[in-house]
Amino acid sequence: MKLQRIAAQTALGLALLYATAPLVHAQEELVVVETLGSTPFMNGGVGKSDEAYMRKAGKDFNLHIEFSERKDNEFVADADLTITDLRGNPVFVLANAGPIVNVSLPDGRYRVAASFHGKTETQLVTLRAKAGQDLYFHWKGDVKLDAYDGKPIGGNAVPG
């Protein structure tokens, strides 16, 4: 009787494990594709696995944008992104963008502006068919130093 109860508990445990295993796996690769108006996009890439998945999923979008700063190229995850047509009409606006944004826009020419800590950079891009375009926004600055020992974070040498 006791052996049957242990076998039943083990079978139930294994059934639950197998039933939830695909859900756990699916959650690891779950990336939310959102829409702003009628524009599908993905915003994220914090952490190595998210970064890798954003790059992989980016092939389904025609515009890939990355944000970084300083000499150590640390990712920026809170830039303000505005994409306009050449007449200045906004077609996509996203606050707290990055470090990677994938966007699908109709073919055409666009002005892409990204702001971070009050500094704005602008780039022009032409999108055609399914050919993907990559844009990189990088804000200059000093290497981030560790508050504890004053040494550079990320292994870069102190400039100067």
Image: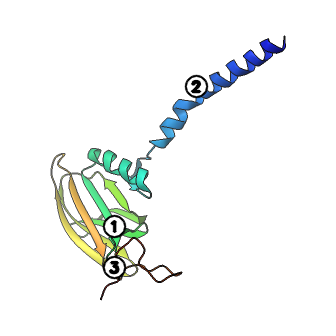
Using the numbered discs, state the Cα–Cα distance from disc 3 to disc 2 in whole angstroms.
Answer: 49 Å
x, y percent for residue 35 = 40, 50
Name the N-terminal-most of marks 1 and 2.
Answer: 2
x, y percent for residue 119 = 34, 81
Please state which of the two labelled residues, at mark 1 or mark 2, is closer to the viewer: 2
Pointer 2: residues within 10 angstroms few (<14), some, or many (20+)? few
81 or 143: nearer the viewer? 143
Using the numbered discs, state the Cα–Cα distance from disc 3 to disc 1 in whole angstroms.
Answer: 22 Å
Q: Quadrant of residue 7?
A: top right
Do labels 3 and 1 touch, CB within 8 Å?
no
Question: Label 2 belongs to which residue?
Answer: 18
The image shows residue 82, relative to residue 50, as above or below, that is below
In the figure, is residue 86 to the left or right of 93?
A: left
Q: Residue at x 32, y 71 (%)?
A: 114
Pointer 1: residues within 10 angstroms few (<14), some, or many (20+)? many
The image shows residue 3, relative to residue 31, as above or below, that is above
Please state which of the two labelled residues, at mark 3 or mark 1, is closer to the viewer: 3
- Local SS, label 1: strand
Please name the amino acid that badge 2 sits on: Tyr
Please state which of the two labelled residues, at mark 3 or mark 2, is closer to the viewer: 3
Q: Quadrant of the N terminus?
A: top right
In the figure, is residue 78 to the left or right of 91?
A: right
Question: Label 1 belongs to which residue?
Answer: 67
x, y percent for residue 97 = 40, 64
Please count the marks in the image: 3
Please name the amino acid that badge 3 sits on: Ala
Residue 157: image tag: 3
Name the N-terminal-most of marks 3 and 2.
Answer: 2
Please name the amino acid that badge 1 sits on: Phe
